[in-house]
Image (cartoon, rainbow, N blue to C red):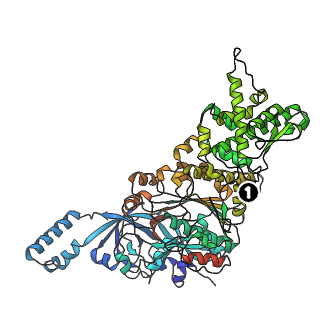
Amino acid sequence: MTTYSGIAAQAIAEASPLLALLKDAKRLGGIYHLDYERATVITDDLLKRECGGVPRHGFLLAAATAPNQETQQPLDEDEIILLRVRGVAHLPNQSEVVATRMAAMRDADLRDRRPSEILDTLTEGQIQMSAFECDVLGTFYPDSVKNQQYVQFGADIDNVYAGARYFVYTPSAKVLEFLASYPQRTPDEIRDNVKPALIELGRVRFAATRRRAVSAGLSEVPVQVRVTDFIARKTAVLGMTRAGKSNTNKTICTAIFEHSVATKRPIGQLIFDPQGEYASVNQQDQTGLRLLGEEWVRIYRLGASADNKQERSLTINFYGQAELSAARGLIDECVGDLEAGYVQAFRAAEIDDPDADNYPGGRNDDGYRAARTGMFRGRFALYALLAKAGFKVPNNWPGITFIMASTLSDAIILDFGPSTLQKEDKGMVRIRTMDGLKNTMDWLCRNIQAAEKATTNKPYQGPDVATWRNCAPFMAIRAAYDGSGGSAVLNRLRASTDFHDPKASTSLLPEVIKDLTAGMVVIVDLSYGSERVATMLSERLVRGLLDMANQRFRSNQDPLPMQIVVEEAHRLFDREKANKNETDPWVRLAKESAKYEIGLIYATQEVSSVDRRILSNTHNWIIAHLNSDHETRELAHYYDFAVFSDEIRRSEERGFARMKTFSGKYIVPVQIAKFDHDMINRARKAAGLPPNEVETVA
């Protein structure tokens, strides 16, 4: 038996499923001019009132029908044209109509009566005539898959009639829901009998003024979108502060989480939270993403509580042996924009273990041993630099060991005491304390400076520091320590101590990857610390995730699907920096993420600050209020958002947005639903968790 789906189910007995689109529709008028892009609709005041008003950008349906018999007989043409109201148009006899209106108003004013009381029926009908200019969005027409009929859409029209064949209708609430949520099912889904995962993102809203929409029963028409549109794709959420961007992101993130646990397909979400609004429970409505459950939400922040199972420290221990590579990477990013020669030498200093395979004699090769000695001395210098910058040494730190001549170590102990360093076997010394690092480094720098200033007339008389002067890694870092190269590196490090926690025991990136692989919602709370720290940390995590994804891709491993959510994206998506740096992680993310199944949701109020390569690769757009024509001009380059520019600048209602999704065929004006406990509890139910009760937050 043939079955129908979606809106077509309402027209089982009809000749065409298109007739369901006209069910309960109200006739507005007719088309008197049509081309491939525009249609001019003629109507009158009475029809507009009966239709509940005609808002700008509202959807209209044009069909070749017999008047008032739209659902009783077949269409003359098996198609319905979708129109969008653009503005008011002039009638062919506009000057005559205006002259008649002026005369009617003049006579009414002179006689102190209503115009309708002094006009004959024909004249009154004439002055009430008006017209709308509409955009042609496309054509609905019938199609079938495996003998199942459905309504197909094409984003144009394939014929233009000169005659007045088309009447125009305003859709009913049910049909408006179909239009705003199209397509509810794709041909593939109908063929395979698959029900897509949908999220009710909000309600249809064409205008800031909603009086007539309420009276016509069109103010609560839901808009459903596909959750999968946001997975592994780029989404822009744009609008001024307090325009509802975070609310939108929380709604989308919760829907993706619900889809992930319901399908048992882990999709990790990494949220960069510059204001702490995702990591914390909202004070006004006592809801937030962390309420999805401590089993599923991990929060990384500075000052994380050891007693809170959801929280992890955002910092690393810069003195930890396992974190040396991560610490060095953060330091390099901290000074990466400095161009001084000594900074470049500092960044190039070798403090990693040399590869014995690069030496003819392996580990017994003199060159290998020399490189290893230089590596440890450079590592000591780096730790001393960190100590001078204010990075506290852990209480149980095992210390740093390196070779030092007895004459030097004895002199240092004589000057500063035995707690500075401990002598060990085979000429090795060990330093375990912050004072020990600084005192030893100060002593070496002082003697090296004296040796450098020595002349034939005033030779250097101090301890022999020649091997230290000839050690390239040590000397490169020494120039940053004692200011002989400059003070910029030390000053940058002093401003970055928020990164360091002497009690931290694990590296950040592997922990984040582990959580994302498990399908968790990972919130990186950047509300503490400097903006520079937030930028560096965000870029480092994104770069690490891309490198991991690239390695899996090259190894023919299945990708790990994940989402990256960025608030205040204008702070991170620096267009000028991206133009100068092709390796910018955000540009890499926009270019490479599709093949890695990494999605990006970015929210900003400054469209013009986002690199155009990111904008050009964006699939989903949700645009709330923007107050600048500079920003709306930038936005106008994409789809047909130029049509909505004036309203985007004028309408300041929170959550009132214009939306274009990957699957959506046209822009839909929508009032975004308020993120609430019902959304949280639906997701918790999908995850097998009990509902969360609203609690008062102190």
Q: Amino acid at mark 1?
A: Thr
Side of 548 relative to 90 (left or right): right
In this view, the residue farthest toward the left is 110
Observer-nearest of 127 and 224: 224
Q: Is label 1 in a helix, a strand or a loop? A: loop
Quarter of the image with the N terminus is: bottom right
Observer-nearest of 168 and 579: 579
Q: Is residue 173 visible?
A: yes
Q: Quickly name the residue at label 1.
A: 506
Observer-nearest of 86 and 692: 692
Side of 105 relative to 555 (left or right): left
Side of 73 relative to 446 (left or right): left
- In the image, residue 300 sits, relative to residue 696, either above or below, namely above
Which residue occupies 53% across, 85% down?
A: 13
Which residue occupies 11% across, 70% down?
A: 106
Point out residue 309 in the picture as x, y percentages from the top left corner: 68, 69
Point out residue 204 in the picture as x, y percentages from the top left corner: 45, 72
Point out residue 598 in the picture as x, y percentages from the top left corner: 65, 58
Image quadrant in which you'd find residue 23: bottom left
